[in-house]
Amino acid sequence: MWSFTCILVDFEYNYAIKQQLEFKVKSIFITGCSSGVGLLAATALKQRGYRVIASCRKADDAQQLIAQGFETVLLDLDDPNSVNQAAEQVLALTGGKLYALFNNAGFGVYGKLASISRAQMEAQFSTNFFAIHQLTQLLLPAMIAQGEGRIIQMSSIVGIIATPGRGAYSASKYALESWSDVLRLELAKTNIKVCLIEPGPLTTKFSANVEQTEKDHLVKNPPIAKKFTLPPEAVLPKLYHALESKSPKVRYRVTVVTQLAAMGKRLLPDKLMDKILMSK
């Protein structure tokens, strides 16, 4: 009996070691990890067993990430050279074996369109759209070469509906939505999946960091939005599914507001939607 038990324990031990050796640690590069959804996602995925490479714009934030045990890359999305350097670092760190890219970083320019200069609009698109195109373009060949990958985009409810005062930010997210749709179609014959996460109001620092162009007419969420605001943790189940499902969804809508907005956009006449969106 003792001999049989020893054999069984030895078999289970060897099997466990074999499983560990065969387990493939997947690498993910996440942008915008200084706070909010980015930091939360980086922490949760690291605990989940992923190899997380986290990026942020400021050196002080990078030091804090390093102190938390993250491999960290400095990335200023408004600087094409910084995007090139970050992509090179990520590929070097992973030996060209990057499984996923989570394009999370971004910011908002709020104000009536008439108050937004061309330079402000260009800055909005530079960070929220052009940099995503550049970074994805640089990292995509590694995914194609290994025959698998996930590209996950942080969109927004305003990528579905455009609301007064958020025109610049909304336009950048509309662009991201359509760009992602085309990329998904172009990669349809590969094992690389493209997904969009579309959150509504979350309790992050995003709104506090918005660039307001009209100081006397600040754009704020309506009071009713507080009833539907969720913590950033609400994004995590969607992110896990997008990364790990064999058949991930094209769009993951977070918060009831986003789900209602998508439904209204699809079913209601434009003029009725206009009245709803202009009412406060």
Image: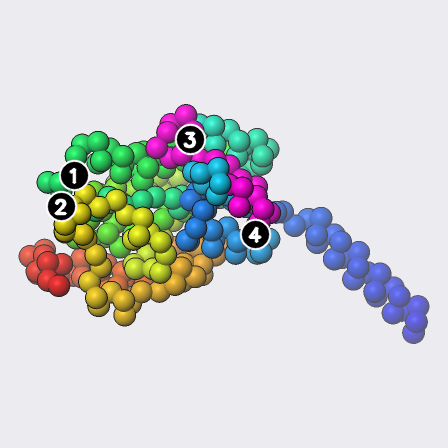
What secondary structure is found at the residue carrying circle 3? helix
Tell me whether circle 4 and circle 1 mark residues in contact (CB < 8 Å): no
Q: Looking at numbered disc 1 in the image, what kind of residue is underneath it? A: Ile
Where is mark 1, residue-wise? 116
Where is mark 3, residue-wise? 83
Q: Could you tell me which residue is drawn at 63 percent across and 47 percent down?
A: 24
What secondary structure is found at the residue carrying circle 4? helix
Q: Position of residue 68 (x, y in %)?
A: 57, 49
Tell me whether circle 1 and circle 2 mark residues in contact (CB < 8 Å): yes
Labels 4 and 3: the sequence-earlier one: 4
Magenta part of the chain: 62-82
Labels 4 and 2: the sequence-earlier one: 4
Mark 3–mark 1 Cα distance, whole angstroms, equals 26 Å
Where is mark 2, residue-wise? 112
Labels 4 and 1: the sequence-earlier one: 4
Q: State which mark lies toward you, 2 or 3.
A: 2
